[in-house]
Image (cartoon, coloured by chain):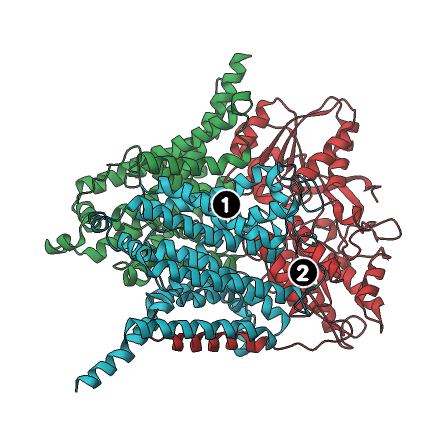
Chain colours: A green, B red, C cyan
Amino acid sequence: MLAAAFADFMQQIVAGLASGGIYALLALALVIIHRSTGVINFAQGEMATLSTYIAWTLIANHGWSYWPAFFATLGLSFLGGVATHRIVIRPVERGNLLRIVIVTIGLLIAINGFVIWQWSGEPQQLDSPFTSIFGWLDIPDTVDIGGVAISMRDVGTVAVALGMVVLLWGLFQFTKVGLALRASAVNPEEARLVGVRVTWMLALGWGLAATLGAVAGMLTAPTVGLDPNLMQALLIYAFAAAVLGGIDSPFGAVVGGLLLGVMLNVLSFLSQYRLFDWFTEELRLPTALVIILVVLLVRPAGLLGHPEVKRV
Amino acid sequence: MRRHPALVVLAVAAVLALAALPGALAGSSADPGVTATTILIGGTSPLTGPAAAYASVARGAKAYFDSVNATGGAAKRKIEYKIVDDGYNPAQTVQAVRRLVEQDDVFAVFNTLGTEHNLAIRPYLNQNKVPQLFVASGATTWGRDAAEFPWTIGFQPSYQAEGLVYGQYIAKTKKGAKIAVLFQNDSYGKDLLVGLKAGLGRSSSKVIAAEPYEVTAPDVGSQIAKLKASGANVLAIFATPTFAIQAYVFANRLGWRPLVINNGVSGTANIMLIASEGGKNKVVEGTITSSILKDPTDPRWKNDPGMRRYRSILAKYANGANVNDIYHVYGMAAAFETVGLFKRLGANATRARLMVLARSVTSAGNPFLLPGISVKTGKGDNFPIQQGQLQRWTKGRWVPFGGLWTSKRN
Amino acid sequence: MSPRVTRIVGFVAFAAFAVFVAVLPAFINDFKAQQYAYVGIYLIALLGLNILTGYTGQISLGHGAFMAVGGYTTAILMAGNEPSIACSSCDGPIGGGMKDIWTIPIAGLVAGLVGIAFGLPALRLSGLYLALATFAIAVALPPFVKRFEELTGGGSGINLFGLPEHTGSITNLEIFGRSLTFNDWLYYLSWVVALVAFAGAWLALRGRTGRAFRAVRDSETAAVSSGVSLARYKTLAYGISAAYAGVAGGLYAIANTFVNPDTFPIALSIFLLIGVVVGGLGGLTGLVFGAIFIYFLPLWAQGEDLGSLLPNRIIEETQKPGGPAIVYGVILILLMFVIPNGVGGLFRRVGQLLTSRRYSRSAK
């Protein structure tokens, strides 16, 4: 009896990690943009959706096979991110914070409209990259451990998220480009003085984030379905994850995402017991947001971020 | 204040006047929206927003009206159908419908989609005596409260009636079944659940777990895990397409193969095909659903004259639309009945007469509904369609079984 | 121009505007009156948000939540919060219905208190973090509302149409010997409140309070060093702006005759912020344009009113679902490029240009 309850509990944790992996990927994109350009990009989710649709349309409407479409999408997303920065963001990034916010909101509205305009609102189907990988490596789709079913696809998603973090960390810590990126975000004027092409660094940041968003979309859509609202529900959870883990920490984004997914599912599991029965499904989203609020009030830098010291 | 506020005031006046100009007083006639040669109807549709998948309903209806216009219209009147986007937000629906009635002077409001949305506008339309025709929602209230709201009439069978059928089916064919339900946390999902429980009645089969989800949920993995943990052997999916697909995907991941009952809104062939994940997801096999429409992907209707007409209308008047999207068929079915009403309207075209006709329909030949399903209203019968067909998903297609069911709700 | 002359010109302009607003309904059709009523409602909300964001420099992406508080307060008070056709799941503590106009100041008060309650912890946040926090509140509120069904009517909301407490929906209002249609009544109600709110904002902002707000916006460190209490003025700004939004929300509920959790989505908060930025932060008159912008542009993007001015081919393409959103988003971005300080800023520039020429002339 207790063993069964424990297995159910672990299943919820596993499901939480699975959802959390998805939050983590999109949160990574948000963190990269913030870290490299200091902007919160409200259009991040829609850009990721657009990338996913591009992958889908290459496969479904133009007959490409999966992997060429996957990499083409990554490339196109990178270019799209760079272009977006140069055309849309650069004219306003020096000014008022509000102007940038409004511009990213305008992007959100326009891109979401474009996706519906071009491809309509019906649900579509996109294959997972893991399907062929597991095929080659002969890995089963689901593994059962002590009554808990673990989907290898979800494991793959979390692995990709962690892998991205490691790559990014390596980029930021050990390469000249990474250093230039960080310098441009923190102190553009001084970075220029030492010869960093700041504008291109900022554009690079956007390109990287767009590529991450594309990965997030292409890994998420096979599970939750592809439609124009793919990222809208996720965006808020991704914000929560990014804030929880630290808005400037890529590793924090992943940790935040996984933690958030698990926390919400644990609450959901516990809601069958009297102490927690106030937690109903309506409160899932607000709880994530209350987490944002509490973290922002108590420790704005998040779990893994560096607290900002304000000097007067 | 600012330096030259007078200028500002003048500018404001100019802009307001400009915005006011195009909306100059519209001419009024006996009953608005209808002339000897035209009828203007309007409705809202979720063209954008979370329910954008249902925009096809309005698109299908419009294509049908266009095809009728091409052959002279209904009783020599061309039908103009104005579709307004409400983004699935009832506040937008209210404002849009008021615009349709007060600015565009429509004859009737047609096929507005969404339960809350139609509830929000129902008192207004009834107060202003504007027909709220063939509401695209399965709430029971459209038929049940017809006495109080005589200008409103529904179209499809109520969700409760549909749930009832599923409950009765399980009670009869699967003794001692343990049923887990995933339902959308609004009146649509809750109505289906209420109907299911009523249909089970006092049989040995019971609903042992029911998990709601919000439309803002990114995924229903947690709910499916809980439902599986309940030990049920039947899963009822009372969810909209995106979440229904997820339910199948997650159940499969967990290695759970219950008997699945999928509600009609999501029980369409194109959704089932997506859920079957290219054939790898076996949970879909044996799914039961109820339908009233002919499915465009069903080979049974390949040479069916009604579906041939459907395909040609869509190709000609809705270029680029996905033929396999069954929501187009729904729109056309409703449009077909509306054209029937308009044909009978004749010279005396008033809104009151339209409602009289709508409440005395006997139409058995709707080419888009399954054969045998009739559209009927009359004294004491305020639900136009009260029948459906149960079908089972077998090897990639829907196969009907049993005869048509009939709901006795009046 | 001396400050006194400026002020007199200001009064005259305001009076002229008030007269204009009063007589406009005689020249436009009934439905347009309803549309301008909504413009008035948005103006009230924008006035509030402007005090917070334009004058005090605190970003709020969640002002729709304050409107929701006001809107639901009004609806709950009017419906009397008992199970009824207005609200089938209501079963709350407040009984009896209240006439709609009396609910408006209460809506403002309740929202104002909520604003202050939010303002206190928000003192610790700034810039992007504040934007995120307010965004979080705006998104979290509708599900919360849905959860507490007995008070708020849950997902189905509260329907106010036809309630005896709701003026004008069933029978025309008889006042001063004239019969007002529902739309005209909405128009006058909204604009009377809007003009009062406008005057109120102007009065509040021109004195010490306004200067304190602007000090907080321009440099918090400098403000503190000059003895301006950050806590006091930020909280005050939240309270006032939330109260304004609450009043707007109450009027919105009355105008829509209906509230449910989806009536005040995050999109509303975003539109309000857009309205303030487009209208021109920190000024008051530009906000009228901001309100017109957020109400009419989505309609114009859908081809309403202006559709006849554009060739058919373009209309067809932009009317496909999603098209209007593309138009709206692109226009928004372009506006941020072209008039970064909003319409109010544009007028200030024009004003400066005109007066500076005069000075250079007199310098000759």
Give the label on residue B182, or none.
Answer: none
Image spot of residue C150 (x, y percent): 62, 37
Image spot of residue B64 (x, y percent): 71, 64
Could you say whether the residue bearing mark 1 is in a helix, strand or loop?
A: helix
Q: Is residue C90 left or right of residue B278?
A: right
Of residue A196 and residue B94, the one placed in the foreground of this image is B94
Alpha carbon separation for disc pair 1 and 2: 25 Å
Q: Amino acid at mark 1?
A: Val
- Residue sitting at x 43%, y 65%: C290
Q: Answer with mark 1 or mark 2, whichever residue precedes in sequence.
A: 1
Q: Is residue B238 left or right of residue A157?
A: right
Q: Quadrant of residue C129?
A: top left
Look at mark 2 in the image and give the residue it sits on: C168
- Residue sitting at x 51%, y 74%: C19
- Residue sitting at x 63%, y 59%: B44
Categorize mark 1 by other alpha carbons within 10 Å: few (<14), some (14-19), many (20+): many
Residue A150 seen: no
What is the chain identity of the residue bearing mark 1?
Answer: C
Image spot of residue C63 (x, y percent): 44, 51
CB atoms of marks 1 and 2 within 8 Å: no
Q: Are marks 1 and 2 on the same chain?
A: yes
Categorize mark 2 by other alpha carbons within 10 Å: few (<14), some (14-19), many (20+): many
Q: Amino acid at mark 2?
A: Gly
What is the chain identity of the residue bearing mark 2?
Answer: C
Q: Is residue A59 above or below residue B6?
A: above
Look at mark 1 in the image and give the residue it sits on: C110
